Amino acid sequence: MDPKSEILLQTTGCTWLSPISKFLGVPLDQVNFIMCQMFGLAAAFWFRLCLSPQRVGPAVRHAVASFLGSFFVIFCFGWYSLHVFVLTLICYIILHRASVRTVHWYTMIAAMGYLTVCQVSRVFIFNYGILATDFSGPLMMMVQKITTLAFQLHDGKCRKQEELTAEQRRLAVVTQPSLLEYLSYTLNFMSVLVGPCSDYSDYTKFIEGHHVHSKLKHNVQHNGYDVQAEPSPVRAVCEKLMVCVGCLFWFFTVTRRFPIGYNVDPRFISDASFLSRLAYAFVSIQAARPKFYFAWTLADAVHNAAGYGISGLDQNGRVSWDLVSNIHIWEIEATTSFKSFIDNWNIQTGVWLKRVCYDRVPYFRTPLTFVLSALWHGVYPGYYFTFLTGIPITLTARAVRRNFRHYFLHSRSIKLAYDVITWAATQLTICYTVMPFLLLAVEPTIIYYRSMYFHVHIISILAMLVLPSRPRRPDLHAQHSNNNVKGE
């Protein structure tokens, strides 16, 4: 293979940084992504300090944010970036031409349809060889942003206030965005490559200079915090950059030593015992996570550096910069439930799924949400194995928790033992569930499941059949009375 062909296989974007790629032994698409994000980090500080709302108007901030984002997409994906721009413009036309009664559904169908067509073509283009930052990534972010805006516009212009939840009322959009505002929201440099998706109302408040006040105003009198002085994000950014450095170190020292593909190596399966295969699956999945930690934490740092991401004050009265955080690493590594893992992994995608699907459909909420998640991720069969497997596991986890957890809450030592057991069970279940997500194709997925004797599937189905969905709970009134007696 000649060097030019090798570069084309590594990236669909600019090849200026190919010497760095060869020197580090890192694929060029990943080098382009990291360089754009690092440049975006520097641009974010400049954006906050030199293009602050006190210095320039919202139009300038919108224009600069969308221009830089468009440049990043073109730099990373070359002519494939046309898909991002075409989808964005198609949905903008729908947003302005469709009735407010149906704009959310037309937008969802158009966005998911276009994404699915691109995902199908991606399978043939890359022949199951997934790139770390191929062109579908920004498309997936576009779908989240576009559909989020369409649903919130429908809430603001069509539905009555009493029909909305408190959150839907807060996020409802009552005026259609201009083209510049729309492009800035969808293509801004902070989130165009890897997200995360944020709400349109929060983003516009940030651009217009009301973000800090809107997030801290409820705490002014109680905490005595001066909202006129914008808090510095330097500490939050430095903490997140330290996490990124740790993830890079982990990637170069550990991740490469435990390739995911070795889980389905015929010789390994035939020679290793079941416990050895289970242990390797656990280690290889743990080793694969830091690359996601790195990308999402760096994106979070870019948002914070621009002054965006304040969610309020924490319990200690410090400003919390986690409004657009996509990952809670400690909660994931120490999780004792499947639901907790889902809630803390790819957080903003989970929020999007909840707001456009789970909260909107009247029946079969959990299955339909998992199906939408799989379709949004792509058409690789491994995605569907993962998300469809997640349905019975989620239902089983709920049943187990309802039937057994209350028996382990009477003693601290018993509760600790319960937490250790549920942590191990959750982590091993997660490994089993997400393995097809990384293997992608049908054949290696079936090989892996067969090597694991389909044990999680079997246990989940049996538990769903045996355990009652609504167990008889202990008499809470009696417990309360006993507690009162003990306290007297």
Image (tube, rainbow, N blue to C red):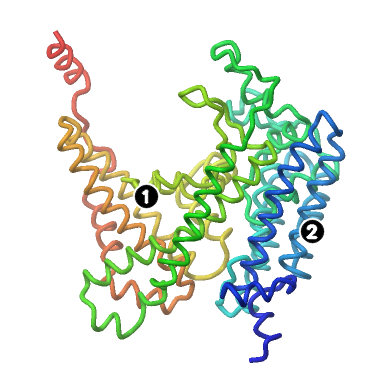
Q: Residue flagged by tag 2: what amino acid is it?
A: Phe
Locate residue 255 relative to residue 103 in the image: left or right: left
Residue at 52% x, 42% y: name it: 239
Locate residue 458 relative to residue 187 in the image: left or right: left
Q: Which x, y percent locates residue 293?
A: 50, 54
Q: Secondary structure at mark 2?
A: helix
In the displayed structure, would residue 132 be above or below residue 405?
A: below
Q: Which mark is residue 333?
A: 1
Residue at 17% x, 16% y: name it: 483
Towards the viewer: 171 or 203: 203
Q: Which quadrant of the view contains residue 254?
A: bottom left
Towards the viewer: 454 or 468: 454
Q: Which x, y percent locates residue 24?
A: 58, 72
Residue at 83% x, 50% y: name it: 93
Towards the viewer: 243 or 159: 243
Q: Where is mark 2, residue-wise?
A: 71
Locate residue 258 relative to residue 428 in the image: left or right: right
Q: Which x, y percent locates residue 196?
A: 61, 48
Q: Which x, y percent locates residue 250?
A: 44, 61
Badge 1 density bin: few <14, some 14–19, many ≥20, Cα 10 Å: few
Q: Which quadrant of the view contains residue 11?
A: bottom right
Q: Secondary structure at mark 1?
A: helix
In the displayed structure, would residue 191 be above or below residue 434?
A: above
Residue at 73% x, 50% y: name it: 189
Badge 2 density bin: few <14, some 14–19, many ≥20, Cα 10 Å: some
Dot 2 or dot 1, earlier in sequence: 2
Furthest residue to the top?
488
Q: Residue flagged by tag 1: what amino acid is it?
A: Glu
Distance of mark 2 from mark 1, alpha carbons? 36 Å
Q: Which mark is residue 393?
A: none
Towards the viewer: 111 or 410: 410
Total number of numbered labels? 2
